[in-house]
Image (cartoon, rainbow, N blue to C red):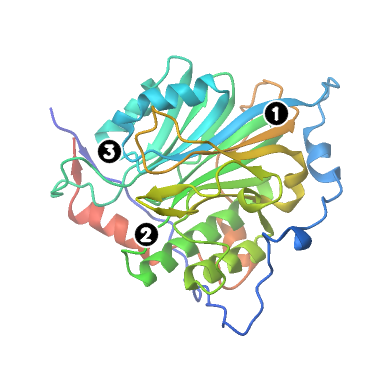
Amino acid sequence: MRVLRMRWYTRLNKAVPELSILEPSVPVPEFNAPETEPNPPEPSVLEAQTHSPHDVEPTTFGSISSWNCRGLRSAIPYVHHLIADGADIIAVSEHWLWPYQLESLKNIHPEYKGYGVSDRRLNAESTFTRGCGGTGFIWNKSIQVFPLTDILSDRICAIRVILHQSTCVNVVCAYLPSSDHPFEEFRSYVNDLASIASALESSGPIIILGDINAHLCDYTDIRARLLHEVIASCDLYIVSSSSIATGPGYTFFSGNNRTSVDHILTNTFISHHITKCYTHYHHELNLSDHLPLSLVLKVDRLVEDATSVNPKLNWKKAVKRTPHFYLLSESILRYFLSTLINPIIC
């Protein structure tokens, strides 16, 4: 029997103005230049949070990887390679899964779980045969993870990783529209990302990774300038372009074209807990035109009962923090209106 699945959204808030674009004459902080990188902050914030009540020494958490797989079904062998290479969490973008296929994220590996969202264009009237878009996570079952299901976006999803009973790290996977899409659509999803980052701020450190589809080192690029506003407002740090980043100097390749459109951003106060950040070199099992990024955190990790952790976002924080963050963006509204008009049947 077919079941009609409809998602409703009832948390409507008054919209506030969108992010502005920096004028070219306004200097943008050069986050990626070695001489201007911020000094490592005092380790009191996260270390105080992650201090174990049992005096457990800090241990290597393993790696958090991000990869635009360009279709998960053909990418499973390489996902297993990343797992064997030590990836505890893998953020995947462009998995191309339809809503009824998202459960397959839980079956990629017997020791891993999964969660994801599908592209809003994959509805009952879609003409796509192979699928498109989508973001998601795969993580080791030994880690306490809560998917943040109240993020209502088809290009952004997040999980809350529990380090201790009262300490967590929020990991966000984003797949922003490419240059083939209108700039207004790109700006709308950047506003979504800014709002989500602001809502997560009060619950713990943030790691944003994925295919951002922008060249953050090119300050003449209007997309990069827009994202740098978010980076400055949310006190983020571009780890993937910092002095500790190693590997190839690009993440996307097509013919002779080599560019970096995949990135990893973190709060500046968590940056001193990152021991490694690297781009993987090409591997024969990697059938995508993107290379994965990985970072390694050195923090306490203690598996405890995390039932008291609230897997929700503080949306009021997102609205109140600064006027150009808003809760309900045009892209999210379009997504749910299309769901109501063209309900997904599976």
Residue on which the image places disc 3:
99
Q: CA distance from mark 3 to mark 2?
A: 22 Å
Q: Position of residue 27 (x, y in %)?
A: 66, 78
Badge count:
3
Judged by depth in the image, the label closer to the viewer, 3 or 2, is 2
Question: Tag 3: Cα neighbours inside 10 Å, few (<14), some, or many (≥20)?
Answer: some
Residue on which the image places disc 1:
165
Could you say whether the residue bearing mark 1 is in a helix, strand or loop? loop
Q: Label 3 is placed on what type of residue?
A: Pro
Could you say whether the residue bearing mark 2 is in a helix, strand or loop? loop
Relative placement, left or right, of 177 versus 204 is left
Could you say whether the residue bearing mark 3 is in a helix, strand or loop? helix
| Residue in front for this viewpoint, 261 or 337 | 261
Quarter of the rendering containing residue 131 = top left
Q: CA distance from mark 1 to mark 2?
A: 39 Å
Q: CA distance from mark 1 to mark 3?
A: 32 Å
Q: Label 1 is placed on what type of residue?
A: Gln
The quadrant of the rendering that contains the N terminus is top left
Judged by depth in the image, the label closer to the viewer, 1 or 3, is 3
Residue on which the image places disc 2:
178
Does residue 221 lie above or below 76 as drawn?
Answer: below
Q: Earlier in the sequence, mark 1 or mark 2?
A: 1
Which residue is most to the front?
A: 256
Asked if marks 3 and 2 touch (Cβ < 8 Å), the reply is no
| Residue in front for this viewpoint, 40 or 185 | 40
Q: Position of residue 337 (x, y in %)?
A: 27, 59
